Amino acid sequence: MLKALLRQSSPIALHARIECAAGELLALVGPSGSGKTSVLRAIAGLLRPANGHISLGDAVWFDSASSIDVPAERRPVGMVFQHYALFPHLSALDNVRLALPRHLPADTAMQLLADMQLDTLATRRPHELSGGQRQRVALARALARQPSVLLLDEAFSAVDQPTRQSLYDELIKLREQVKLPIVMVTHDLREARLLADTISILDGGSTLQEGPPERVMSQPRNARVAALVGLRDIHLGIFHKAAPVGTMARLRWGDASAGIDLLTTDKGRLDDGAHVRWVISGEHVQLHTQRAADMANLVVCTLQDMRRLGEIVTLQCRPQALPQARLHLDVTTRFARLLNLQVGAVVYLEIDPQGIHIMPVKRALEDPLA
Amino acid sequence: MDWPALWLSVRLSVATALILLPLGILAARWLATSSHPLKPVFEAMLALPLVLPPTVLGFYLLVAMGGDSALGSLFQSLFGQTLAFSFSGLLVASVIFNIPFALIPMQRAFESIPADLHDAARTCGLSRWRTLWRIELPLARRGILSAMIMTAAHTMGEFGVVLMVGGNIAGETRTVAISIYDKVQSFEMQAAGTMSAMLLVLSMSTLLVSTWLTRSQASQRHG
């Protein structure tokens, strides 16, 4: 298990905590300047935090309290950089060979390149290779040390989409072969969701939330996480406890004067009348064009706008009982065509009570995105 | 043509370049990567010979090497001769006034190595020595070669410092630049012209080679 606890206030604020088990892929996600690359560099030994502890199993790599700081070159880490960082004066083979521990036979380097389908390009220098080929060489070089931890710093961001897809395949294949803790830095949520077992949301150098991608994205801990994971609609409401106990609680979307009452689950953590923020991910919202008698938690909306983005159409729905609110929903173009959706039409959104994720707030009139 | 003076200049140039090669590499590498608060002071001190009048530098070196100075008396007690007005003294002066000509191109060459290559070298498990040998020196080699050529060429043409520290002793301190001055003083204009033309061609060739090396380095980086 790789564990890192980092604390410092300058020059870059860090209050991060990560854990990554062997065979697990942890994605550090956050906006630019959130400190995700600093966390990776601290694990690699390229950045010395003011305080903290970094260990892999029983081996302590860094401990500020006992002044332990294993230098980067002695940490069994393989690292892939955003812009490859291949040595430009060396061939692909020599790049890999240079990282090879002395006890390994020299042909191991060629085998690693062959595993990446690069054996025929072994004598080429980096500038004679495409972006995808360079990143494969970088991955082969990172693996040449037989590392105990693999670190990927925005490793897929500098290549085009088809190349990125093939690099994803390479990483998935690699994970089947070796059971390493893999820590990946990315700002691409789709990439994190696709590849990671766990995501850790970082902002301002602090870990805001960590967990399986589905959980973090559907149950963000607070409004900031919700915004960072790309949830567009963060609503305000008032929570009313279930009465009698065991029945569904009531969520008043809006305020006492104007709003919509929705049924939701009561986890017993909120007081009656608590002001809350709430989100719902698209998978918990069912879109209908006709009202049916058995529909629960129904929100009647006017279709305010439709934006076509390739195979996806983003619908902007305006609840009729709460005209200032908006609810965005992504559907496939085919589905939109099947339902013959048009701007101005009335649609019925059926909200799954289990899918409503409620976050407490201190003040009711707080800016939802603050 | 004053062949002994030319031979002395060649010996002085080669020796200066060879002494500054390892010292320059170590200092340039440190300056390129260091964030020491006094780094600008060191840089200014090392670049001083660029702006200081050669006679001023020569004067201070002469004082520092004279028989009354600690360095001069130590040299005399060890080798039985004065440091000033000797080839050894000339070499010491030459090394000092050539520091910026060797150091600046080398420092720029080390600075132009991208930071992520240093990080990559460390995460590849390379020691500092191996990183210098396998990554930094090959990538900075053109800058280092350019520094050596500039140093050698500058030594060939230096006049003020040489005259102050070495005087004009045939076979010991009379370089080709001093010899040209000497020939003009004695109205041997043809000999002075031949040697001047030779230095002109040498200087031009040096600048061309240096420019070519710098451009090749830039195109290699962006290739």
Image (cartoon, coloured by chain):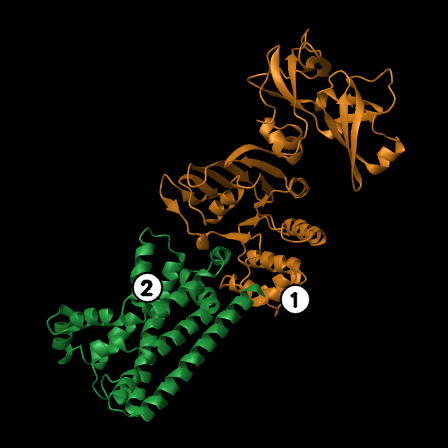
Chain colours: A orange, B green
Q: What amino acid is labelled 1 in the image?
A: Asp
Residue nearer the viewer, A328 or B116? A328
Q: Are marks 2 and 1 in contact (CB under 8 Å)?
A: no
Q: Which residue is mark 2?
A: B47
Could you tell me residue A151's position as x and y percent? 55, 49
Who's the residue at 59% across and 66% down the image?
A: B223
The answer, for residue A286, to whether it is visible in the render is yes
Residue nearer the viewer, A63 or A312? A312
The answer, for residue A107, to whether it is visible in the render is no
Residue nearer the viewer, B46 or B140? B46
Horizontal side, residue B192 vs residue B164: left or right: right
Q: Which mark is residue A11?
A: none
Q: What amino acid is labelled 2 in the image?
A: Ala
Residue nearer the viewer, B189 or A37? B189
Who's the residue at 49% across and 52% down the image?
A: A76
The chain identifier of the residue carrying mark 1 reads A
Q: Which residue is mark 1?
A: A119
Closest to the camera, between mark 2 and mark 1, is 2
Who's the residue at 68% across and 41% down the image?
A: A190
Q: Residues within 10 Å of mark 2 (few under 14, many from 20)?
A: some
- Disc 1 secondary structure class: helix
Q: Outermost residue toward the top?
A: A244
